């Protein structure tokens, strides 16, 4: 049996050695072809899916950051416009503000004067009921 293996392995006129030598000499080409085949048939679709799935999140993050930066710029721009609008309105309405403040202070003074007058009137009426003279009433009220 062993003799049969030896004879069939080496083939007629020892050509088996030539086949082995040829395969070893050009083995790197065969392995490269095999790797290319596997890559194209098996890994290429998986690689594409993996590549897309790994490239998408960073691009989404980058897009989000750019949009947020634009939004922040718009908010700052809006804030600057608000300050300018406030300054302009403050200048335009300064006369109105002063008039309103004057009316408020006059109204407060009027209210105090009214309360003071009513208090003196009540006091004057009390003194009159008690029978005080006009001179005494005027002296107490003033």
Image: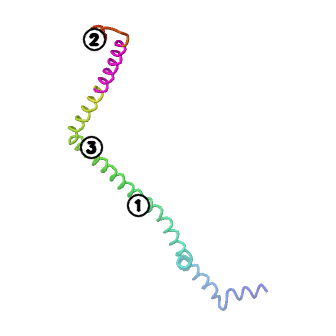
Q: CA distance from mark 3 to mark 1?
A: 34 Å
Q: Secondary structure at mark 1?
A: helix
The Cα atoms of the two marked residues, 3 and 2, are separated by 55 Å
The percent coordinates of residue 5 (x first, y second) are 74, 86
The first of marks 3 and 1 along the sequence is 1
Tag count in the figure?
3
**Is residue 53 left or right of 75 when viewed as pictured?**
right
Mark 1 or mark 2: name the one nearer the start of the chain.
Answer: 1
Decide which of tag 3 and tag 2 comes sooner along the chain. Answer: 3
User: Which type of secondary structure does the marked residue at label 3 adopt?
Assistant: helix
Q: Residue furthest bottom?
A: 12
Residue 61: give x, y in percent of width and height.
44, 59
Give the crowd class for mark 1: few <14, some 14-19, many >=20 residues within 10 Å: few
In this view, the mark in front (3 or 2) = 2
Color encoding of the figure? rainbow
Q: Residues within 10 Å of mark 3 (few under 14, many from 20)?
A: few
In magenta, the rendered stretch is 110-128
Residue 130 is a magenta residue: no
Q: Which mark is residue 138?
A: 2
The quadrant of the rendering that contains the N terminus is: bottom right
Front label number (1 vs 2)? 2
- The foreground one among 88 and 36 is 88
Residue at mark 1 to residue at mark 2: CA–CA distance = 86 Å
Q: Secondary structure at mark 2?
A: helix
Q: Are marks 3 and 2 in contact (CB under 8 Å)?
A: no
Q: Which residue is mark 3?
A: 86
Kindly identify which residue carries mark 1: 63
């Amino acid at each position: 049996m062993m003799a049969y293996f030896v004879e069939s392995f080496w083939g007629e006129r020892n050509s088996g050695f030539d086949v082995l030598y040829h395969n070893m000499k050009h083995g790197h080409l065969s392995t490269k072809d095999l790797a290319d085949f596997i890559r194209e048939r098996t890994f290429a679709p998986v690689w594409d899916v993996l590549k897309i799935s790994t490239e998408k999140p960073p691009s989404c993050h980058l897009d989000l950051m750019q949009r947020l930066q634009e939004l922040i710029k718009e908010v700052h721009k809006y804030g600057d416009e608000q300050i300018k609008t406030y300054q302009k309105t403050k200048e335009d309405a300064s006369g109105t503000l002063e008039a309103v403040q004057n009316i408020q202070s006059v109204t407060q003074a009027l209210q105090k004067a009214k309360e003071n007058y009513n208090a003196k009137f009540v006091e004057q009426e009390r003194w009159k009921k008690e029978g005080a003279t006009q001179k005494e009433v005027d002296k107490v009220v003033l």
